[in-house]
Amino acid sequence: MNVRLYIWQRLTAALMVPLLLVHIAVIFYASRKGLSAADILARTRGSVSWALFYGVFVSAVAVHASIGLRTVLTEWTPLRGRTRDFAVIAFGLLLAVLGFRAVVAVVLP
Ligand code: HEM
């Protein structure tokens, strides 16, 4: 793995730690308060803060997981060079599209 990818993987990992903690705290809060899906959507719909929070989270996961998958493919498969990089970029884009679709579903009014 080159230095740039190494740094991006650590940066996205460090970014995901606080986001993950907030996400888990929100899950605990919602379940302890017995919030329904409608209650949760009433809070998230139209919220720029939640859109930014989950948008950044999805971006970090897509970048982090693709770089990680690149290492796994290099170690465990004969895939190399452009074929491998094309596969992980496609994987990252798929994660990003699915993730942003979910974010849009909870924040769009
Ligand atoms: C807070 C969440 C996360 C943290 C702190 C984290 C941290 C890390 C770190 C530090 C590495 C580098 C390990 C190494 O090179 O020795 C790594 C590798 C990796 N991560 Fe994550 N990660 C997180 C979430 C995720 C998620 C959500 C995915 C997948 C959807 C993922 C997939 C991978 C993969 C595939 C690798 C490569 C493993 C390897 O190099 O052998 N990680 N992660």
Image (cartoon, rainbow, N blue to C red):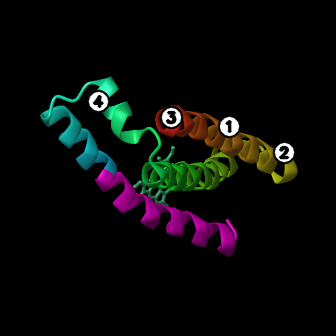
Q: Residue at point 38% right, 56% down?
A: 19
Magenta: main secondary structure equals helix
Q: Which residue is mark 3?
A: 109
Q: Earlier in the sequence, mark 2 or mark 4?
A: 4
Q: Nearer the viewer, residue 63 or 6?
A: 63
Q: Earlier in the sequence, mark 2 or mark 1?
A: 2
Whether residue 72 is situated above or below residue 45 in the rendered picture: below
Q: Which residue is mark 2?
A: 83
The residue sitting at the left extreme is: 32
Neighbours of disc 4 within 10 Å: few (<14), some (14-19), many (20+): few
Q: Which residue is mark 1?
A: 94
Check contact, mark 1 vs mark 4: CB within 8 A.
Answer: no
Q: Residue at point 50% right, 55% down?
A: 52
Neighbours of disc 3 within 10 Å: few (<14), some (14-19), many (20+): few
Mark number displayed over residue 27: none
Q: Which residue is mark 4?
A: 39
Using the numbered discs, state the Cα–Cα distance from disc 1 to disc 3 in whole angstroms: 24 Å
In the image, residue 94 lies in the stretch drawn in magenta: no
Q: Residue at point 19% right, 42% down?
A: 29
Q: Nearer the viewer, mark 2 or mark 4?
A: 4
The disc labelled 4 sits on which kind of residue? Asp
Position in image of residue 37 (x %, y %): 32, 25
Q: Earlier in the sequence, mark 3 or mark 4?
A: 4
Instruction: Report the span colored magenta.
Output: 1-22
Q: Which secondary structure lies at badge 1?
A: helix
Q: Quadrant of residue 92?
A: top right
Q: Nearer the viewer, mark 3 or mark 2?
A: 3
Q: Residue at point 54% right, 56% down?
A: 60
Check contact, mark 3 vs mark 2: CB within 8 A.
Answer: no
Q: Nearer the viewer, mark 1 or mark 3?
A: 3
Give the quadrant of the N terminus. Answer: bottom right
